[in-house]
Image (cartoon, helix red, strand yellow):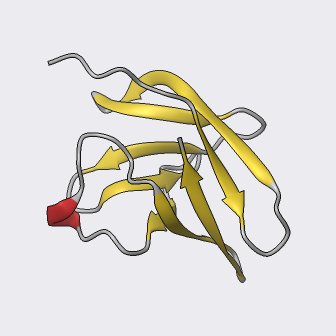
């Protein structure tokens, strides 16, 4: 089955900053999206589900309220949490 990949936004709740993600080449054979201004991707990682990863493939963001067994074929909309160093932010993934 072919899945149409839409672009989406991450909207940071604390200050309204918006990051745009667009479809890109698959990572590990999985659908992927790349942030347009940085080397950050959203992809599916076995055992973790949909996540944000950096260039080292370190997980730096996860959907907060969707358990692995409830994840669908696309990254879940709604609340995501990021972590980079000592900082953490809450975002909304919006298609």
Identify whether 90 is placed above or below 50: below
Q: Position of residue 63 (x, y in %)?
A: 43, 65
Q: Position of residue 14 (x, y in %)?
A: 79, 75
Q: Residue furthest top?
A: 2
Q: Position of residue 35 (x, y in %)?
A: 66, 38
Depth check, front residue: 88 or 63: 63
Where is the N terminus found, in terms of image quarters? top left
Q: Position of residue 60 (x, y in %)?
A: 55, 63
In this picture, residue 11 sits left or right of residue 75:
right
Identify whether 16 is placed above or below 86: above
Looking at the rendered structure, the number of numbered marks drawn on it comes to: 0
Depth check, front residue: 83 or 13: 13
Depth check, front residue: 37 or 17: 17
In this picture, residue 69 sits left or right of residue 39:
left
Q: Quadrant of residue 34?
A: top right
In this picture, residue 51 sits left or right of residue 94:
left
User: Residue drawn at (43%, 33%), measured in percent from left and top?
Assistant: 32
User: Residue drawn at (35%, 31%), measured in percent from left and top?
Assistant: 31
User: Residue drawn at (39%, 47%), measured in percent from left and top?
Assistant: 75
Identify whether 16 is placed above or below 22: below
Q: Quadrant of residue 83?
A: bottom right
User: Residue drawn at (74%, 40%), measured in percent from left and top?
Assistant: 38
Identify whether 12 is placed above or below 93: below
């Amino acid at each position: 089955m072919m899945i149409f990949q839409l672009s989406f936004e991450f909207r940071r709740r604390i200050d309204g900053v918006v990051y745009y993600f667009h479809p890109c080449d698959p990572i590990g054979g999985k659908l992927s999206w790349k942030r347009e201004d940085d080397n950050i991707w959203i992809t599916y990682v076995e055992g973790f589900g949909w996540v944000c990863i950096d260039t080292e493939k370190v997980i730096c963001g996860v959907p907060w309220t969707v358990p692995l067994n409830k994840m669908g074929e696309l990254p879940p909309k709604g609340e995501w949490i990021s972590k980079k160093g000592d900082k953490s932010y809450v975002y909304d993934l919006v298609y």
